[in-house]
Amino acid sequence: MGRKSDGIRPWYDKKIDKWHIIDPEPGAPKYRWSLGFGGEKEGAKRAYAEAKAYEEEKRAGGRLMMTRQSTSDVTVADLIAFYIDRRIENFVPDDDYPNELVRQEDVLGRLTVLIEFFEDLPLDSVSRVRCLDFGKFVHTREIARAKALHDRQYAIYEEKVAAFHKKVAAREKFVADLAERGWNRVLPPLRSKPPVPLEPFNPAAIPYRRSASRRYLEELSAAVTFAVTYEFIRHKIHIHLPPKYDPRKHQFTLADVRRMIRAAYRFKGMGWVNGKPVKDLPTRRHLARFAFLAITTGSRKDKIERVSFRNEGDRPWIDLWQEWVPDIDEETGEDRGSLQWKGRYHRLGDDEIEHKTKQAPNLPIPAIAVKRLVRWRDQGIIYPCAYPYHRQGKEEPGNVKDGMRAIFEETFGDDTESVIHTFRHSAATWLCADKELPLPSVAAYLGMSTETLVKTYAKHREEDLQKIAAAISDPHRKGKGVHTVKVRETKPQQGKNGRQKSTDNDRMAPNGRRQESTAIDESRAKSTRDAA
């Protein structure tokens, strides 16, 4: 009988002073390969760690190739590794998953946080309690991020304090030098002021948000569903999800939108022109254009900030053209029509993919917006929401999140509830409030389902409910007497042959005044008579 194999292990070659990994198992890519470092004593610890890591990775890869595994044998890390491998890195479209994941970097970030908490925990032990504990873990991470931000702000504060003290010291030295020379010159007060000290960091000031962990756990639930679909595990497990955030109720008024657009349009700041810094430039006019398009089209943020006047395929674009609009005079019959500008807003480029949950239909551009869009295009603008004074001379759309936050705070104060999505929320609310507009058409214009529109915004259509309530009791409405006709058509009276006539095939046959007998009893009695 042969000696039992020692399995995967590190091995040190004294001749060349190198550590190796030996994998004697069948099917291994190599039997032995070098780790690239030596030192019999110095490198031993590192070599054993490398061998252990290789073995764990190999075992995990083997588990990923297995099917219909029990949830007690699969860890959360294995599940997420399978999901990343098949859904992101080596994705192949099929009937169940026809499209790639959007914002894959964000998905990978959330999956990394899940692995950090659950690690090698068996899948069947992901209970309600552990999901609640994960919510506390997310809160701890939020506190750590706030602490890191406070530390950076405090470092900037210390730099400002040091610079202020340096100015004060230089001024005091200058005054002392003048006094030594016998000059009694009175200097103006120092214009610089000491920076406002920061308040100490208080972790209790960061509220605990139950819903903060929901997006992470939704990714875990999606990974479980994917694993069941592709038979990696036998059955699903329930992932407890915290409640969703309360729906936003804050909305803009027309005056609010005008204030923001006016403030962004008039703002002056420093920008870069031909590689040189220039002051008093209109550095926020692209944000004014963003706000205008957001409230007039009701589109999502990424469908506005990336829009172009050219059909580039990989981004939304705006199509503008002139069209003859006739205007016939009733008396003379003369056509006094004219050419008018028309436009179409394509929320998706030709090369982009539309997802079921994020509808992006194209829409006709309102006349009030077409005129401005033509003017912007004639000014040579390609991307209406791109920052035009970039240091490196770039002219391409970027993220407007920080710039819009500054406008919100300057217009409404630091404690404002306004966010970029408030534009879309306000546009939907305004359109739903108009009782002449049908809700399905409003939903199609905004790019959302009618169910979502009704669920979120239909409370503003109380007039429709009042119409229905009045129509039910209105005696003069069209179709009067329909309910009466329907009632008269019914015949509740029973006919003469209300009861089915008995047949010989019935199991229970009438037998005069005697008790009803079955067909079996009747056949038995007939056999007795025949025998007699």
Image (spheres, rainbow, N blue to C red):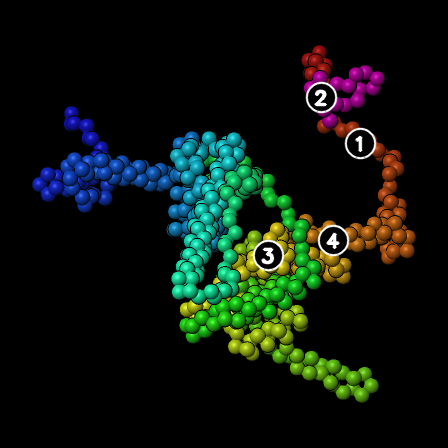
Q: Which residues are magenta?
A: 506-521
Q: CA distance from mark 3 to mark 2?
A: 91 Å
Q: CA distance from mark 1 to mark 4?
A: 58 Å
Point 52% across, 34% down: residue: 132
On the rendered structure, is 315 left or right of 53?
A: right
Q: In the rendering, which numbered label is found on residue 516?
A: none
Q: Which residue is mark 3?
A: 409
Element type where label 4 sits in the image: helix
Crowding around mark 1 (Cα neighbors within 10 Å: few <14, some 14 to 19, many 20+) is: few
Q: Position of residue 294 (x, y in %)?
A: 61, 63
Q: Which residue is mark 2?
A: 519
Callout 1 amino acid: Gln
Crowding around mark 3 (Cα neighbors within 10 Å: few <14, some 14 to 19, many 20+) is: some
Q: Quadrant of the C terminus?
A: top right
Please tell me whether mark 1 or mark 4 is closer to you in this view: 4
Q: In the rendering, which numbered label is found on residue 500?
A: 1
